[in-house]
Each structure stands twice: as structure tokens, then as C-alpha cells.
Amino acid sequence: MDSSKKHLFPDQLLSARRRNILSRFGLGIAASLVLLTLLSLTNSSFSVPFVSPLLQGLRNSNLNNPSPVSTNQVDEKKPEVVPVPDVKVLSFESGQTRDTGPKNTSLSGEGKVSSFESGQRSGETVTNSSLSEDDKVSSRNDQNTLEANATMISVGNSSSLVSANASKEDSGSVEAEQSRGSYEDCDIYDGNWVRADDETMPYYPPGSCPYIDRDFNCHANRRPDDGYVKWKWQPNGCDIPRLNGTDFLEKLRGKKLVFVGDSINRNMWESLVCILRHSLKNKKRVYEISGRREFKKRGFYAFRFEDYNCTVDFVGSPFFVRESSFKGVNGTTLETLRLDMMDKTTSMYRDADILIFNTGHWWTHDKTKLGENYYQEGNIVYPRLKVLEAYKRALTTWAKWVDKNIDRNQTHVVFRGYSETHFRGGPWNSGGQCHNETEPFHNTRYLKKHPSKMKALEHILHDTMKTPVIYMNISRLTDFRKDGHPSIYRTVYKTEKEKREAVSHQDCSHWCLPGVPDTWNQLLYVSLLKAGLASKW
């Protein structure tokens, strides 16, 4: 073939005009590639589908300039926690305000100092303004996920809860530090009992407090096991401080705290007296003002803490409303309960600085004469009224009295919820038992439904009352503790026959001391701190 024919097409293609067009086109492509490369290297969010694979190697190459923040730096950064300068906190030890200087706001462990200042709460998460918006969103999403996971942990499985937290702490990850928040921002009544195999529990040694009623003093009554004093309450979403007795007394200086209610509140009152007394060096400076050491009879009792010029009192009023009488049509006298009138004991506590109310255990058909010809309003005695309806009406009377008579600027009102019972094999007056229980429930499927009385109370607290009330929702946490009751250990038995006979008359309502009510008082202390009341005590 003629060589001139072979080169005919190339000569035509590479004519001067077409070479010029080709050169300009090539320069355009090259310039575009350079621009795309610069954009990709300076902005990680910029992406072009067919170019990204080509540039991926360049991003990872050592020829590129290092990024402003290394990968290790990003992993080590704690995006949502920053030092807060010059936060003033109230010392738990002295109750005095002190300047702590820069302080990390994350809270973990028991006994941490809490801030009572209104501007910046201790444990509050502070947004780091130097983070990019994408980093903030990512960090918030991670925190929400952690909180959701914490909520999903079964409260009935203490071993899984403890081991999960331990593994997170060992890992040293950001998630481990953020998995528990401040007690100010979590539900402290949602949690589980965990074993305390150290010196943190109980709050006072068994047998050390002379002001425990014999019926509650299981140690003195020779209960053979002592595991019931070695459990502490652990909320799912946070850690809570221990009750610091000295700090509590300092905040009560010159004040009056009163428990009002039934014998379960007396249980809690005796517990607090013992905890506070144990924190003092000179225990002779604590005494009941009338000299009494037995408190089962209904009435008024007051413990004075001389060094702090304060009292911790108990007023027996199991119904809140007035027990009365009514003459029937045939001249007979009927004992009644006036659902529309408060008990006469109100004069004993209306001037208190802190009031802790409870009622519930006497609201049964057995203790209210089956609701027949017993409940009274005005001049009307109801032939029959259901106990729950009567309970609602009595609570409404109480709520109106509180709103009208309690100075919310002086007095802080607390309502402790219903304490569950654990009678097995029958009710309290028909052979119910709990004397062989030595461990709490570890599975939530054995717990009861939320008490209907507490649903009625919650409606009144939230929808009816004007006075703010701290609601201690302890029903579920007490339901775990089938092991904490006096059962047959309400007295010392002289013979085995007496002990056997006691099996049919057990106490599975009240609690051994030391024991569960000590935790209620810890939660009372934390609830007051949480509500921001400590600076007002």
C-alpha cells in the first residue's frame, strides 16, 4: 500500500486549526482537574462521584498538608464538657461558700460537691462553642443514644448493670464518661439495688442508735442475717451523693423539720434521727424534748439537736383528716372519718420549715370498717363508699389546706409515696409471711403495678394544687426489698414455741432499722438538693 495513503487521516486530523482546538480543550480539562483537586483537599464535604475515587489516594498521601486537627486529637476531645471558671459551690463539709476556681462540670461518684447557685448548676453540660456544627450534632446524637441505652438497662438485674458500667469505665471511652449524667437531670427513683460490700452501708452501725422502736430493731431482736443492711440504691441515669449528716444539720440550723403521717413515716423519722445523731461527736446533745424513748403511741414527738438549734419531729396523723363521731337515727354513736376536715394536729406542724407527709397504709377496708357508715362529709354519713374514692376526697381536703395555710416562701412540702408490703400466703391479718426472705427481687416481673392510690395522689399534686410539692416516688424501689421487713423479728422470744407462734403474725409492712428507710432519707436529701432548695433552708 502507498505510504501517502496511510498518513492521509492523521495529516487531516492534525491540521493547524484542529491542533489549536485540541490544545485549548486539553487545557480546559487540566484546569478543571486542578480546581476540583483544590476544592476536594480544602473541603472534606465537597464530593464529585466520578472524581472522588481518584482523589482518595491524594487525601491519604503524605504529600498532602496535614489537617489542622489530627485523628488522635478528635478521639481524645470531650466535646460537650468544658471547664467552667469561678463556679461558687457550697461545701458539703462546712456549708460555707467557697471559690473553687476552674471546675469540670461533669459529676460522678458519691459525695461530690453540688452547686446551689442559680446561674450554673453543678453537673450541667456546657456546649463547646469552638466545635463545628457537624461535631455538635454528632455529639448530641451520641449522648441521646447513650441515655436511651441507659434507660433500656433492666433495673431488675443488678449484676448486668454493674458489669456494664465497669466495662465502660475500663475502656476509658467518651461514652463511659457520658453514660451517667448529673442527679439534677435524672429520675433518681428509677434504678436498682446494688450490693455495697464496703463500709458505705449502713449509715449507722446496727445496735448503735437508742431511738429505734423495738419493733423495728431487727438486730436487737436477733435476726440471724444482716445482708439487708448492705444494699444501696443506684439510679440508672446518674450517681447520687450520700446523705451527709453534718451538712444536713447545718442546713437545718435554726429550723424545724416535721414528719406527718402513719407509722411508716415514723419508721422514716427514726431513721433520720439516727443518721443525723451518728454524724455528731457529742451524742448527748441530741434528745427527745419530753424524755420519751418509745414512740408507738399516737402523738407528737420532737428530737432537738442542741448544737444546731433545730428539731426533727413526728406527728401521728395516719389519715390527715379528722376522726370523729356521729349520732345515728336511733341514738347510737357512730365512729366516722370526716373527709372534709383536717385533723386537729395541724397546729403542731403548720409553722415547720420542711414538711414530709405520707398517708396510705390505713386506707384499707379492714381499717375503715369496710367503708360502711364510716365516711362523713358535713352532716352526711355515706352508707357505703369505696376506699379509693374516700382517699381521693381526703387528699383533696389536705391539698386545699396546704394551699391555704402553708407559706410557700417559708415551708417546703414533701410527699413520700406509698411503701409496698410483701405479705406472702395471705394478708397482714391472715397469716401473710416474709420471714425467710434474705435477698431483694432481682427481676422486675415480680414487681407490682403502680399503686392506684399513688395515681390519685399524682393527679392532685400535678393538676389541683398550687403549692409546689416534692414527690418522693418510692413505691417501685421499695417493691424490690422483700428482705427488709421485721417479719417475726419484732421482739426477742424466750422460747421456741413463742417464735413458732409469731410466724402467723408477721410484720411485712414496716422496715428494719438500719435498713430501707435510710435510703428514703438519702433520697429526701438529694431531692431537696435537686429542687434547688438547699440555699433556702
Image (spheres, rainbow, N blue to C red):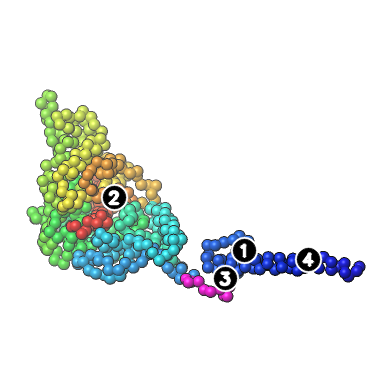
Residue identifier under label 4? 13
Q: Which residues are magenta?
A: 61-70
Mark 4 burial class by Cα count in 10 Å: few <14, some 14-19, many 20+:
few
Residue 322 lies left or right of residue 13; in this view the side is left
Q: Earlier in the sequence, mark 4 or mark 3?
A: 4
Distance CA(mark 4)–CA(mark 1): 30 Å
User: To which quarter of the image does residue 85 belong?
Assistant: bottom left
> Where is residue 372 drawn, in percent x and y?
21, 30
- As helix, strand or loop, the secondary structure at mark 3 comes to helix
Closer to the eye: label 2 or 3: 3
Closer to the eye: label 1 or 2: 1
Distance CA(mark 1)–CA(mark 3): 15 Å
Distance CA(mark 2)–CA(mark 3): 57 Å
In front: 491, or 97? 97
At label 1, the amino acid type is: Val
Residue identifier under label 3? 60
Does residue 245 lie above or below 464 as drawn? below
Whether residue 72 is in magenta: the answer is no
User: Which numbered disc covers residue 474?
Assistant: 2
